[in-house]
Amino acid sequence: MKVTAFEDYLPDLLEAMKAAGRDREWWMTSCETVYTSCASAEEMSEVRAAIGGTWKKRVSPGEFGFFELEREFGPFTLQLSAWRNTVCEKVVTGTRTVQKPDPEAVVPLVDVVEEVFEWRCSPLLEKAEAPAT
C-alpha cells in the first residue's frame, strides 16, 4: 500500500470512528480492516447512522456466525460486527430429509428430517446493500 492511500483515506476513516463515539473500542483484523462489536440491532443501527455513508452487509453461513456491515474508505474497511443471532431472526422455511449415520443402528445410515431455515435481519439493518455476487 502506498503512503498516499493513508494520506487520502485515513483522515476520513478516523473521523468515522470518532463519530461512532470516542469510548467505542476498535480492533484491527488486518492492516486494512478495523472493526467494532455491536451487542444489538439497535446499537449497530445507531453506529451506522452516526458514521453515515453506504454500507454493504454480509451474513456468514452455518449455525453460528456473524452479521457484518462494512463501509469502504479507499483501501480501508470499517466493519460493524454482531453475533448473527442477536440481530437476525432464524426463520424455518421448510424441512428436508437427509441421511446421517446412526452409531446404534444396524443400518449405517438413517433418514433424518432437518429444518430448512434462512436468516432475516432486522429492518433497521436492511438499508445496507448486499455485496455483489
Image (cartoon, helix red, strand yellow):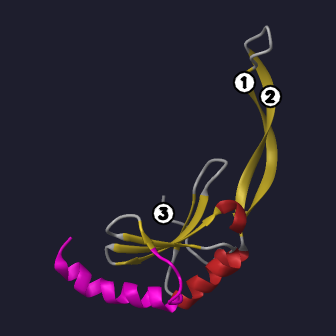
Image label count: 3
Q: Could you tell whether 17 is left or right of 48 in the image?
A: left
Q: Quadrant of residue 49?
A: bottom right
Q: Which residue is mark 2?
A: 112
Between label 3 and label 2, give the one nearer the viewer: 2
**Could you tell me which secondary element the residue under label 1 belongs to?**
strand
CA separation in Å, label 1 and label 2: 7 Å
Foreground residue among 25 and 88: 25
Residue 35, percent from left and from top: 47, 72
Q: Identify the residue shown where x is 50% and y is 81%.
A: 54
- CB atoms at circles 1 and 2 under 8 Å apart? yes
Between label 1 and label 3, give the one nearer the viewer: 1
Q: Residues within 10 Å of mark 3 (few under 14, many from 20)?
A: few
Q: Which residue is mark 3?
A: 132
Amino acid type, callout 3: Ala
Give the residues drawn in magenta, as a range.
1-26
Residue 59, percent from left and from top: 59, 60
- Compared to residue 85, the image places residue 7 above or below, namely below
Amino acid type, callout 1: Lys
Q: Identify the residue shown where x is 56% and y is 90%.
A: 50
Q: Which residue is mark 1?
A: 100
- Compared to residue 121, the image places residue 71 above or below, namely below
Q: Could you tell whether 75 is left or right of 87 in the image?
A: left
Q: Residue furthest top?
A: 106
**Could you tell me which secondary element the residue under label 3 belongs to?**
loop
CA separation in Å, label 3 and label 2: 35 Å
Q: Identify the residue shown where x is 46% and y is 90%.
A: 18
Residue 126, percent from left and from top: 65, 74
- Compared to residue 113, the image places residue 86 above or below, namely below
